[in-house]
Image (spheres, rainbow, N blue to C red):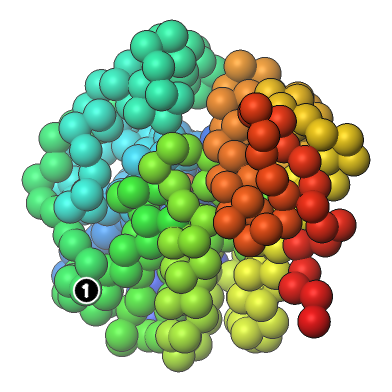
Amino acid sequence: MEKYAFMESLADNFYLVRGANNATIPFCNSFVLDGNERVLIDAGLDHSVIKAIDADRRIDLLIITHSHPDHTLASHLLGDRTLMLPEETPDSVHDLFELGRRFTGSDRGGIHWEQRMRSVYGLQPLKPADARFKNGDLLDLGGARLEAIHLPGHLGDHYGFFDHNSGVLLTTDVDFTGFGPWYGHEEASIERFKTDVQTLASRDARLVCSSHKPPIRSGMKDCFDRFFASFERQQQEVLDTLESPSTLEGIVAASPFYHNRFPDPFLQRIYEGHLVKKNLDLMITAGIIKINNDIYTKVKETTHAIH
Ligand SMILES: [Fe+2]
């Protein structure tokens, strides 16, 4: 099957399908398993790519790892195939306004998000699931033996997989990007995300694949360590905006995460608000900053523990 430039073999009958534009949003890497049935994991691919894979051999089953649109992008092209979703995926995936409301926290945000996703990305809602998987399930599918690993730090219904047959670990949006961990929704959690990274790092994987970077075939521990270190780097960058005391709005306007380069300013404010606020809450608990009358003030210069 490795006859296409966008396919890369990971193991026997297990392929990575590279997302367009180096698998940057709105695309992601997806994965093909070829056994008795052909399985596609995530659908963040160009339409032409999904059609080519399907023409080569019919895709029987689509597994979606979580509700984010870069993972469901072209799923409607497989509307007549079996769809498996995480047990935790809520009904909002079947209605783009409701999904937008979930991701933005307001009706206004839901309208904006739906309009943007339809017009810019051609996103369509997911059809009802034919089957569900949950944490710890072993899915004997496509010649693999996939263990579902719940990773809710990124999103409540976010999953990775470990194939016990090949030793391939799919970390999905524990993604090793330079941005670092993304937890820009209300339902995301930095502390849980840290646990998720440690859970994945503890697996004895032969090969590690995320949704937005090339496969990692060696030096996995260093990659996990570097990604884990970016939690602290992100927190320090939030702290660095507090040269003088500031409100949450002031810190978000300083944009320590997106540097005001996110393509949609309205969504940037919402996502950056969560990214910033979650770090502020942790720094208050750690005594690094304090809050008084909605004004945040630096108490320590660094997020590092000083001994
Ligand atoms: Fe995601």
Nearest to the observer: residue 91 or residue 33: 91
The mark tally for this picture is 1
Could you tell me the amino acid type at mark 1? Gly
Left/right of residue 120 with respect to residue 135 in the rendered view: right
State the quadrant of the C terminus. bottom right
Question: Where does residue 63 sit, x and y in percent of width and height?
Answer: 27, 53
Work out whether 115 lies above or below 208. Answer: above
Work out whether 74 lies above or below 12. Answer: above
| Extreme residue in the front direction | 292
Residue 258 visible in the current orientation: no
Identify the residue shown where x is 59% and y is 39%.
Answer: 277
Question: Where does residue 262 sit, x and y in percent of width and height?
Answer: 70, 28
Count residues near mark 1 (Cα–Cα under 10 Å), then give few for <14, some for 14-19, many for 20+.
Answer: few
Work out whether 163 lies above or below 245. Answer: below
| Extreme residue in the right direction | 243
| Extreme residue in the bottom direction | 204
Identify the residue shown where x is 86% and y is 57%.
Answer: 301
Disc 1 secondary structure class: loop
Left/right of residue 141 with respect to residue 255 in the rendered view: left
State the quadrant of the N terminus. bottom left
Nearest to the observer: residue 219 or residue 300: 300
Identify the residue shown where x is 77% and y is 69%.
Answer: 304
Check disc 1 and report the residue beneath it: 136
Left/right of residue 212 with respect to residue 128 in the rendered view: right
Report which quarter residue 283 is drawn in: bottom right
Report which quarter residue 21 is drawn in: top right
Report which quarter residue 252 is drawn in: top right
